């Protein structure tokens, strides 16, 4: 599953202004293998894109990677501004 993480990093890092703050947490559920993106709040809009087109395209690419057993899910975690 390391390939999927590297693929996500390769796609998302060029889109954001603070690539050093990108972290990916992998949550292994019963049905899904979830990749949670933790980004700078200012970069979330860049990853989602207009009308969600960018994240839809990213998900289409990531979901096309063959996996064994579990389905892959890509989630953007939103941080609360303190």
Image (tube, helix red, strand yellow):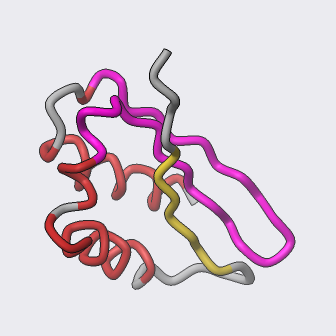
Q: Residue at coordinates 34% horizontally, 33% vertically from top-left?
A: 41
Horizontal and vertical percent position of residue 68? 67, 81
Which residue: 40% across, 84% down? Answer: 64
* Quadrant of residue 3 within the rendered picture: bottom left
Residue 41 part of the magenta segment? yes
Q: Residue at x 52, y 45 (%)?
A: 77
Residue 71 occupies quadrant? bottom right
In the image, residue 21 sits, relative to residue 4, either above or below, namely: above
Query: Which residues, given as a range, are shown in magenta?
Result: 20-44
Q: Where is residue 4 in the image (x, y as percent from the top left)?
A: 46, 61
The extreme front residue here reads: 82
- The residue closer to the viewer here, 40 or 1, is 40
Q: Which residue is drawn at 74% across and 83% down?
A: 69
In the picture, measured across the screen, residue 76 lies left or right of residue 30, that is left
Against 72, is 24 above or below?
above
Q: Please tell me whether residue 66 is drawn above or below residue 62 in the rendered image.
A: below
């Amino acid at each position: 599953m390391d390939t999927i993480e590297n693929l996500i990093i390769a796609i998302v890092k060029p889109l954001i202004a603070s690539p050093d703050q990108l972290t990916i947490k992998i949550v292994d559920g019963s049905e899904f293998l979830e990749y949670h993106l933790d980004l700078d709040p200012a970069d979330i809009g860049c990853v989602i894109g207009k009308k969600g087109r960018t994240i839809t395209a990213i998900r289409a690419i990531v979901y096309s990677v063959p996996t064994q057993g579990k389905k892959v899910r890509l989630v953007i975690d939103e941080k609360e501004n303190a």
